[in-house]
Image (spheres, grey):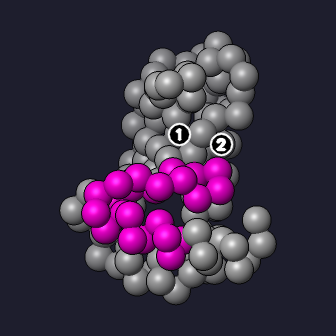
Amino acid sequence: MDKEELQHRIKNAIVLLTDGHSFKVGDLTLKCQNDYFDVTGWSLKSDIKNITKKTALSELKETKELFNKMCLTSPELLDFIKGREIRFYLSFDIEKSSVEICSETNGDLKWTMELKE
């Protein structure tokens, strides 16, 4: 997705996020809930059994980096998230459902799923 397309998708996302809907932009799913802004990244592992703490932390880091790039690309997104607490999540997609692996808010990491080292 080029910069112009990303900016367009983010503008569309902000309209839906304002109404409490989630919206997928690239590899991330964004959602706004009052004073919180949720950013969910999705594990690339094909089997949940292959996820370790190390791979989950790496994918969570990639999620945060990708979101930061979006913010640098879109002043509208920066304005929209101003004053909101950002919560990052890493989840695993299971067909019509998903499982949260871990989350991070203000540097506080929380494991939702027990994983091997």
- Indicate the secondary structure of the residue bearing disc 1: strand
Q: Is residue 17 magenta?
A: yes
Q: Within the image, what quadrant is residue 59 found in? A: top right
Residue 113 visible, this angle: yes
Label 2 neighbour load within 10 Å: few <14, some 14-19, many 20+: many
Q: Residue at left 36%, top 63%? A: 17
Q: Secondary structure at mark 2?
A: helix
The residue that disc 1 covers is 90
Residue lying at the far left of the rendered structure: 34
Q: Residue furthest top?
A: 49
- Tell me residue 38's x, y (percent): 40, 54
Residue range of the region highlighted in magenta in the rendering: 10-32
15 lies left or right of 92: left
| Quadrant position of the C terminus in the picture | top right
Look at label 2 and name its amino acid: Glu
Give the image quarter of residue 84.
bottom left
Q: Quadrant of residue 26?
A: bottom right
Compared with residue 34, is residue 28 higher up or lower down, i.e. above or below? above
Residue 9: percent from left, percent from top? 58, 69
Q: In the rendered image, which residue does mark 2 sit on? A: 59
Horizontal and vertical percent position of residue 78? 46, 80
Total tally of numbered discs in the picture: 2
Amino acid tagged 1: Leu
- The residue lying at 68 percent from left, 17 percent from top is 47
User: Quick one: quadrant of the N terminus?
Assistant: bottom right
What separation in Å lies between label 1 and label 2 (alpha carbons)?
A: 7 Å
* Cβ–Cβ under 8 Å for marks 1 and 2: yes
Name the N-terminal-most of marks 1 and 2.
2
- From this view, report whether residue 61 is shown above or below residue 12: above
